[in-house]
Amino acid sequence: MGILDKYDESIRLTYNYTVRMLTHLKNIRDNFYNIKDPDEITKEVYRDSIIKKYETLEDLTWKLLSKIFKAAGLEINNPRGCYKQAFKEGLIEDINIWNDILMSRNATSRIYEEVDYETIKNDIVNKYIVAIEKLLNNISNKVI
């Protein structure tokens, strides 16, 4: 087994885990939408769950890209660099949404206002899930 085989296995494992995390996030979103008249505590629990899963998903996503690029000989060890390279290679269509994804991820640990928390949650369910799913589909089609 050569070094590239090790990268392939690591890339596949990380890809599969990232897909599972995306699926979990989508299930949380869908389950919340199916609740009739949720009370405020239920809304808060679902919102917090969505944001927590998103934080993990975003972390896995850029680390997956980092492994893909490392296998190709590029050493990129930060999310912004990974997203820029993925855009250059056609894995990401809209770099602006990925800048927003990164900014929102960085902001989640420093949110103190409910309105900001709610805004990020809405961006996750309405924009970020779609962008991450497109990236994972592109990785599946072009890389794996």
Image (cartoon, rainbow, N blue to C red):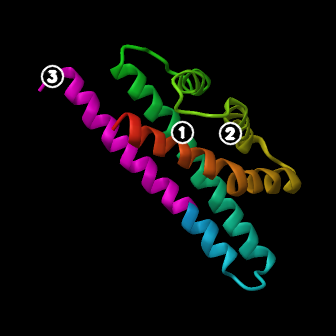
The segment highlighted magenta reads 1-25
Q: Can you say whether 73 is above or below 25 in the image?
A: above
Q: Measured from the top left, where is residue 113 in percent x and y?
A: 87, 51
Neighbor class of circle 2 (other Cα within 10 Å; few <14, some 14-19, many 20+) is: many
**Residue 141 occupies quadrant:** top left
Choose the circle earlier in sequence order: 2 or 1: 1
Q: Can you say whether 100 is above or below 79 in the image?
A: below
Q: Measured from the top left, where is residue 66 in percent x and y?
A: 45, 26
- What amino acid type should be assigned to the residue bearing mark 2? Ile
Q: Tell me if 4 is positioned left or right of 108 in this view.
A: left
Q: Nearer the viewer, residue 70 or 77?
A: 70
Do the residues under discs 2 and 1 have CB atoms within 8 angstroms?
no
Asked which secondary structure carries label 1, the reply is helix
Which residue in the protein does label 2 denote? 101
Which residue in the protein does label 3 denote? 2
Q: Residue at x 15, y 22 (%)?
A: 2
**Residue 45 occupies quadrant:** bottom right
- What amino acid type should be assigned to the residue bearing mark 3? Gly
Q: Does the rendering let one see residue 56?
A: no
Choose the circle earlier in sequence order: 3 or 2: 3
